[in-house]
Image (tube, rainbow, N blue to C red):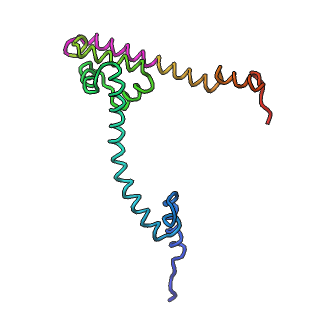
């Protein structure tokens, strides 16, 4: 019986490894033996770092929330305590996003937390209707902020003064199309 060679399978296996090592330098990219070792090493650390990334993001969110809270005279811990007492259930990811993108909305959140810390609107100190009203006011403010952001994006996409002025400087009037 004739010997069976596995050239196609070997070539496919090698190609798969070399494709996974795209972006590596030197022989780690071109030499199969070195590339295979590099790939195994990279995949092992990718698994570890996937877990680490979650903690790194949480630390980043906490730093951002702390910086924004200190601008309003609260520490991170006091802010979280106030939010818990006020019954506001925003996670750290959302709080950090609001702090960076919508400082006015974050100021409203901090205001609610300060009120809860002072005992004016905590769940144990205020009736349920007052807490619901405060959360409704905050929700309306967030909806208005999202509408402003949508308007800004529409203005940027459709033109506006920051786009029309350079066109005028270059001799293009509104409505004219540049010839290619």
| Residue 26 x/y as whole percent | 52, 64
Q: Is residue 131 above or below residue 84?
A: above
Corner quadrant of residue 77: top left
Q: Is residue 63 above or below residue 158?
A: below
Corner quadrant of residue 166: top right
- Residue at 50% across, 67% down: 27
Left or right: residue 21 compared with residue 92: right
Left or right: residue 165 compared with residue 28: right
- Residue at 77% across, 28% down: 177
Q: Quadrant of the C terminus?
A: top right
| First to last magenta residue range | 124-143
Q: Is residue 137 visible?
A: yes
Magenta residues, dominant SS class: helix
Left or right: residue 118 compared with residue 26: left
Instruction: Count the marks.
Output: 0
| Nearer to the camera, 74 or 140 | 74
| Residue 80 x/y as whole percent | 27, 25
- Residue at 37% across, 32% down: 93
| Residue 44 x/y as whole percent | 37, 58
- Of all residues, the one furthest to the right in this rendering is 179
- Residue at 44% across, 62% down: 39
| Nearer to the camera, 136 or 56 | 56
Q: Is residue 16 visible?
A: no
Q: Is residue 134 magenta?
A: yes
Left or right: residue 15 compared with residue 61: right
- Of all residues, the one furthest to the bottom in this rendering is 1
| Residue 118 x/y as whole percent | 23, 13
């Amino acid at each position: 019986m004739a010997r069976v060679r596995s050239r196609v399978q070997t070539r496919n296996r090698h190609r798969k490894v070399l494709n996974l090592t795209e972006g590596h330098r030197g022989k780690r990219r071109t030499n199969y033996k070195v590339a295979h070792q590099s790939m195994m090493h990279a995949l092992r650390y990718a698994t570890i770092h996937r877990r680490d990334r979650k903690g790194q993001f949480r630390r980043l969110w906490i730093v951002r929330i702390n910086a924004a809270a200190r601008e309003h005279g609260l520490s991170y811990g006091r802010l979280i305590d106030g939010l818990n007492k006020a019954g506001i259930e925003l996670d750290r990811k959302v709080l950090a996003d609001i702090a960076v993108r919508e400082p006015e909305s974050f100021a409203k959140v901090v205001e609610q937390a300060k009120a809860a810390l002072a005992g004016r609107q905590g769940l144990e100190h205020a009736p349920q209707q007052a807490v619901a009203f405060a959360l409704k006011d905050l929700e309306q403010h967030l909806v208005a902020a999202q509408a402003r952001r949508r308007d800004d994006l529409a203005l940027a996409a459709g033109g506006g003064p920051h786009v029309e002025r350079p066109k005028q400087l270059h001799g293009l009037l509104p409505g004219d199309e540049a010839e290619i």
